[in-house]
Amino acid sequence: MIKRLVPGKRLSQATIHGNTVYLAGQVPDDYTGNVEAQAAQVLAKIDALLKDAGTDKTKMLSVTVWLPNMGDFAKFNTVWDAWVPKDAAPARACVEARLADPSIKVEIAVIAAIS
């Protein structure tokens, strides 16, 4: 069985299959902040989606982070490091890429277990 959370025309914000939830790439709602502010917004959205799926950030399996400017890597990591639970860091990739809007400074996709 497949369950979709916040389905839309082009994508669902999350898709649950079995004991795994796949989050779509999450971007901030407010594009005006710096990378730290945008990262905090995105991580809050991830927390909410994981909760709606019946899990939390301690169950993250894999995360992909996209930054349009790899010069923001250290700044992003200050927010990430404060958010990710101790001893629960997922496998993670961070890639420099042009995002859908030039004002977006971070996008994050997550795969997590549900238990």
Image (spheres, grey):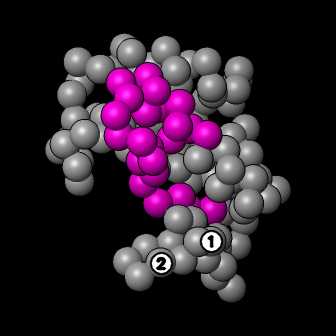
Q: Is residue 110 above or below residue 104?
A: below
Element under disc 2 = loop
Q: Amino acid at mark 1?
A: Leu
Tell me residue 38's x, y (percent). 43, 33
Amino acid at dot 2: Gly
Q: Nearer the viewer, residue 9 or 65?
A: 9
Where residue 106 sits: x, y (%)?
36, 37
Which one is nearer the viewer's eye here, 101 or 72? Answer: 101
Mark 1 secondary-structure assignment: strand
Residue identifier under label 1: 5
Q: Position of residue 27 (x, y in %)?
A: 41, 47
Does the magenta portion include 19? no
Q: Nearer the viewer, residue 10 or 16?
A: 10
**Residue 25 located left or right of residue 84:** left
At a point 34% along the width and 34% down the height, the residue shown is 32
Q: Which of pointers 2 and 1 indicates the residue nearer the eye?
A: 2
**Relative to 101, 108 lies left or right:** right
User: In the drawing, does residue 87 fall left or right of residue 111?
Assistant: right
What residue is shown at x 45% (from left), y 47% (from top)?
29
> From this viewpoint, is residue 93 visible?
no
Q: Please tell me whether residue 39 is drawn above or below residue 14 in the rendered image.
A: above
The quarter of the rendered structure image containing the N terminus is bottom right
Contact check, label 2 and label 1, Cβ < 8 Å = no
Q: CA distance from mark 2 to mark 1?
A: 9 Å
Q: Residue under circle 2?
A: 8
Q: Residue drawn 19% across and 42% down?
A: 102
Q: Which residue occupies the extreme right position in the image?
A: 115
User: Which portion, as a residue range, is magenta?
Assistant: 21-44
How far across and how far down the image is residue 21, in percent? 63, 62
